[in-house]
Image (cartoon, grey):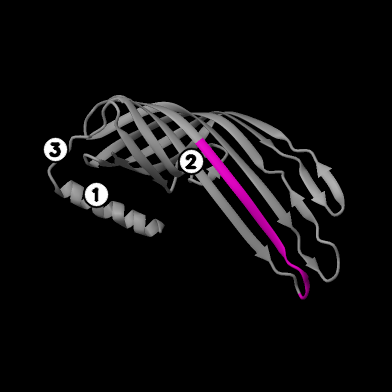
Amino acid sequence: MKKVLVLAVAIAMIFGLASAQDVVPVAKTGSKSLNFTFGGLGAFGINPSGPNGGIGVSYFLNSDAAIRAGLQLGLATTSTPANPSGTDGSTSSLTLGIAGDYLMYMNAGRVRPYMGAGIHFTTQSSDTKYVVNGPGTQDEQKGGTPTTFGLAGIIGAEFFIYSELSLSAEYQLNIISLTSTSDLTNSNPSSTQKGGSSLNILGFGGGGATLHIYF
């Protein structure tokens, strides 16, 4: 799917560059765009810098300023077979990331540098069931996964292939990031391990590319 998206973007860029250079961006007061991030904004997965990809929407307050919201949702499951017999193990995790940004654009041309700031929130839940080889009671572990709230600085540039279609490259700088983990609980034997927290001030964030479709 990712290769298909990259190919489609490359074809659109070729036709866009081959067409007339007088592309007039439709970005103005009230304009909206759907945003599809791939390969980044961190990695668009989830990392300590916040949500790193997924789908989002932008709304232009005027031709030089916009607000942006993003959503990332991920579900991962793995299984581990028992050997030679017993109870199979499994691991599952659900990740949710949301972000809100305010962006200011430097000009109204085909290439539009911008800067801004954003906040993000990510959380993850997990459940692990350990393999039991032979007879015995399976141990299940829940929790211990991070919840992060952060503030980031943003700098990037958007290039309009057509009036309603553009690509942007962006870099985010982590200003402050607070991460906490939930308690770890085990079922067999029953036990609880307290979660911790960490605070990061300033640091490298992540970069990525986004396809924008205006409407």
Q: CA distance from mark 3 to mark 1?
A: 15 Å
Instruction: Please identify the quarter of the rendering in which residue 164 is found.
Output: top left
| Residue that mark 3 sits on | 22
Image location (x, y in percent) of residue 52:
49, 42
Q: Earlier in the sequence, mark 3 or mark 1?
A: 1
Magenta residues span 84-98
Q: Position of residue 183 (x, y in %)?
A: 76, 40
Q: Sequence order check: which comes first, mark 1 or mark 2?
A: 1
Q: Quadrant of the C terminus?
A: top left
Q: Residue at x 27, y 39 (%)?
A: 159
Which structural element holds mark 2? Answer: strand
Residue 149 lies in magenta, yes or no?
A: no
Q: Which of the labelled discs sits on residue 13, or is there none?
A: 1
Q: Is residue 87 magenta?
A: yes
* Residue furthest bottom in the image: 84
Observer-side mark, 3 or 2, equals 2
Q: Amino acid at mark 2?
A: Leu
The main secondary structure of the magenta stretch is strand
Q: Quadrant of the N terminus?
A: bottom left
Q: Cα distance, mark 3 to mark 2?
A: 33 Å
The amino acid type found where label 3 is placed reads Asp
Task: Determine whether the residue tagged by mark 3 lies in a helix, strand or loop.
Answer: loop
Please say if the residues under marks 1 and 2 sit with CB atoms less than 8 Å apart: no
Q: Residues within 10 Å of mark 1 (few under 14, many from 20)?
A: some
Circle 1 SS class: helix
Task: Indicate the amino acid at tag 1.
Answer: Met
How far separated are the C-alphas under marks 1 and 2?
26 Å
Give the residue at mark 2: 71
